[in-house]
Amino acid sequence: MVSTVLTIGELAARAGVAPSALRYYEELGLIHAERSAGGQRRYQRHTLRRIAFVRAAQTVGLSLDEVAATLAALPPDRAPTQAQWQPVAATWQQRIDEQIEDLRRLRDRLDGCIGCGCLSLERCALYNPRDVQGAEGPGARKLLPRRAR
């Protein structure tokens, strides 16, 4: 008979994450553990699905705060229905489309920069004349535009 509960070590091995990550996810309210009489964490098997969701969301670029907000709208103890999942999927599709566009823009700008031959972010007449971007602080301001999230 297959057990419906997993120890933190079993869950970590099955989910492919470190036990410390599971404790952190629990602290953030992304997953929930019950405690044994000895105080050890015991996770329901369906927690694997929530961890997979967290990992997939992070791959798409969602912050853990965004993941928590999304998980709060989904059932905590079973897979979501199609109707419950559809708004999440639509949001993810939009996010992925934005990332694809950002990567295309980055690719195109890198080609242009490499093509000019200067490779200087301080003196580049095309992307950073007279180092005006330096006054705006650190980071790749032209290559990867910051999106409002």
Image (tube, helix red, strand yellow):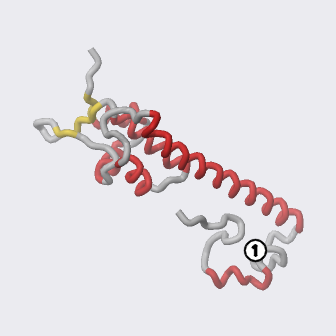
Q: Is residue 144 above or below residue 127?
A: above
Above/below status of 41 relative to 69: above
Which residue appears at 46% of the width and 39% of the height? 85
Q: Residue at x 41, y 49 (%)?
A: 70
Residue extending farthest top: 1
Q: Answer above or below: position of 60 versus 120.
A: above
The x and y percentages for residue 30 are 34, 47
Front one among 140 and 50: 50
- Depth check: 135 or 77 in front? 77
Task: Read off the residue under disc 1.
Answer: 121
User: Which residue is painted at 63% across and 81% down in the image?
Assistant: 136
Tell me the quarter of the picture where residue 80 sits.
top left
Looking at the image, which residue is at 25% across and 29% down? 5
Q: Give how far across and how far down residue 37 sits, in percent.
A: 10, 36
Q: Residue furthest front?
A: 83
> Residue 1, percent across and down?
26, 14
